[in-house]
Amino acid sequence: MTSPTLTRPELTAADRCDRCGAAAQVRAVLRNGGELLFCGHHARAHEDKLKELEASIERG
């Protein structure tokens, strides 16, 4: 028996940055399962804090 694998869909043009509404280029998946979407600018601005929170960073 295999266990199901949960995958998140790839980012599309419809995905928007949670900070400014620009096109999302990065998905940060938090340890509790939540996710944040960021444009390139805001991903770089918050990168240190996301690493501190041990978020998984997925670039799209």
Image (tube, helix red, strand yellow):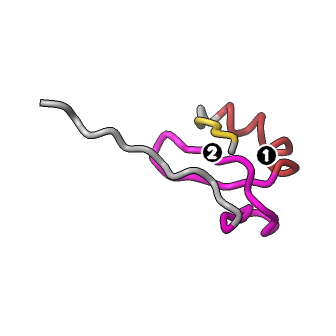
Question: Given contact means CB atoms under 8 Å apart, are the residues at marks 1 and 2 in contact?
Answer: yes
- Identify which residue is drawn at 49% across, 39% down: 31
Q: Position of residue 44 (x, y in %)?
A: 84, 41
Helix, strand or loop under label 2: strand
Q: Position of residue 19 (x, y in %)?
A: 77, 63
Frontmost residue, 37 versus 25: 25
Question: Which badge, 1 or 2, is on the more N-terminal residue?
Answer: 2
Left or right of 7: which side holds 1? Answer: left
Residue extent of the magenta highlight: 14-39
Is residue 7 magenta-colored?
A: no
Type of amino acid at the residue the image marks with label 2? Ala
Q: Which residue is mark 1?
A: 43
**The quadrant where residue 14 appears:** bottom right
Q: Quadrant of the C terminus?
A: top right
Other residues around mark 2 within 10 Å, as few (<14) / some (14–19) / many (≥20): many
Frontmost residue, 1 versus 21: 1
- Identify which residue is drawn at 66% across, 64% down: 15
- Identify which residue is drawn at 63% across, 45% down: 28
Q: Is residue 9 above or below residue 13?
A: above
Frontmost residue, 10 versus 41: 10
Helix, strand or loop under label 1: helix
Q: Is residue 26 above or below residue 18?
A: above
Q: Quadrant of the N terminus?
A: top left
- Identify which residue is drawn at 85% across, 45% down: 45
Dominant secondary structure (helix, strand or loop) of the stretch shown in magenta: loop
**The quadrant where residue 13 appears:** bottom right
Type of amino acid at the residue the image marks with label 1? Ala
Q: Distance of mark 1 from mark 2, alpha carbons?
A: 9 Å
Q: Which residue is mark 2?
A: 28
